[in-house]
Amino acid sequence: MGRSVTIGQYYPADSPIHRLDPRVKLLGTLVFLVTVFFIKNIDSFVLATAFLVLVIVLSRVPFRLMLKGMRAILAILVLTFVLSIFTVPGQPLAHLGALTITREGLRTALYMCMRLFYLVTGASIMTLTTTPAKLTDGMEKGLRFLRVFHVPVHEIAMMMSIALRFIPILMDELDRIMKAQKARGADFQSGGLITRVKGLIPILVPLFVSAVRKAEDLANAMEARCYHGGEGRTRMKPLVYGKRDAAAYLLLAIYTAAVILLGIFPLSAKL
């Protein structure tokens, strides 16, 4: 299970996306995730798909690794699809007993699943191509304007980076705990709903204890290295924009403008 979670993992490679400034990748990810919610026609869908495929190809991250990350939200995708096709009213397509599948429900289900897929994939590309240290530096420098409002930008960036890094670590720990409990004869599949919920207790308790222990070890390690926040700290590799970053910003601006224009002046029917 843990290895199927791509958000928070880093995939080492020498690619144009890896070499981009982390601020570019953070802003690009945010813009892409926002524009996903403005996709309302086939043209915007094709444009977003082409943009995402281009980024994946340039990142040189195996596509199978992207698909592996979808296993973690497979249950959410199935639940979203089933609820949408049966609950959205509209023109009937088929009947399954008392339930009715509508054309509008099927369209909405596909639309919502596509959104979830793009959201997870877009966030995964950012973490797969950016180390936690660069991610923290990018967040801090990109949000430094908030210091005017006395917002602890460095501490917030550090917490977000640590939280992202802990996702695959905790999922690996969950996988080990489940295997250990199964080796002791634990059964998580049989029984009713109440029995299955009770069966999660031997998993959640050690997982919680392990998470607290890892957090305490991390805090001790940071304290041993005299970490006291971002005040007065310097960086071994300061972030500096280059020509490739300017080209990436230009491409991002063109993509955003195209999504907006296609939303206002669609060339085809709505989804």
Image (cartoon, helix red, strand yellow):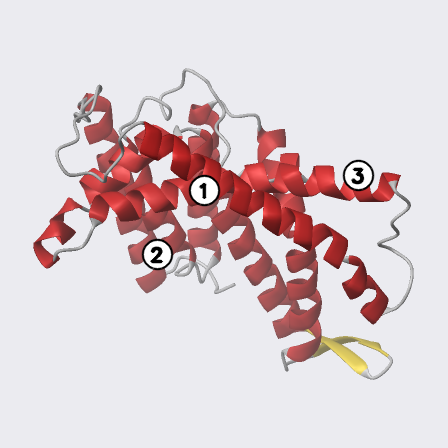
Above or below, 185 relative to 188: above
Nearer the camera: disc 3 or disc 2: 3
Count of all numbered marks drawn on residues in the image: 3
Q: Position of residue 24 (x, y in %)?
A: 27, 36
Q: Quadrant of the N terminus?
A: top right
Above or below, 48 relative to 247: below
Which residue lies at the image location 79% right of the left edge and 64% below the top edge?
198
Kind of residue at disc 3: Ala
Answer with mark 3 or mark 1, whichever residue precedes in sequence. 1
Which residue lies at the image location 85% right of the left edge and 43% below the top edge?
182
Nearer the camera: disc 3 or disc 1: 3
Q: Is residue 113 found left or right of 19 in the rendered image?
A: right
Above or below, 28 relative to 237: below
Residue 180's disc number: 3
Residue named by callout 1? 164
The quarter holding residue 96 reads bottom right
Kind of residue at disc 1: Leu
Answer with mark 3 or mark 2, whichever residue precedes in sequence. 3
Nearer the camera: disc 2 or disc 1: 1
Kind of residue at disc 2: Leu
Instruction: Say which of 190 and 92 sits in front.
Output: 190
Residue 262's disc number: 2
Q: Residues within 10 Å of mark 3 (few under 14, many from 20)?
A: few
- Secondary structure at numbered mark 1: helix
Q: CA distance from mark 3 to mark 1?
A: 25 Å
Q: Position of residue 20 (x, y in %)?
A: 30, 26
Q: CA distance from mark 2 to mark 1?
A: 34 Å
Q: Position of residue 60 (x, y in %)?
A: 48, 22
Which residue lies at the image location 64% right of the left edge and 37% below the top edge?
172
Q: Are marks 3 and 2 in contact (CB under 8 Å)?
A: no
Q: CA distance from mark 3 to mark 2?
A: 53 Å
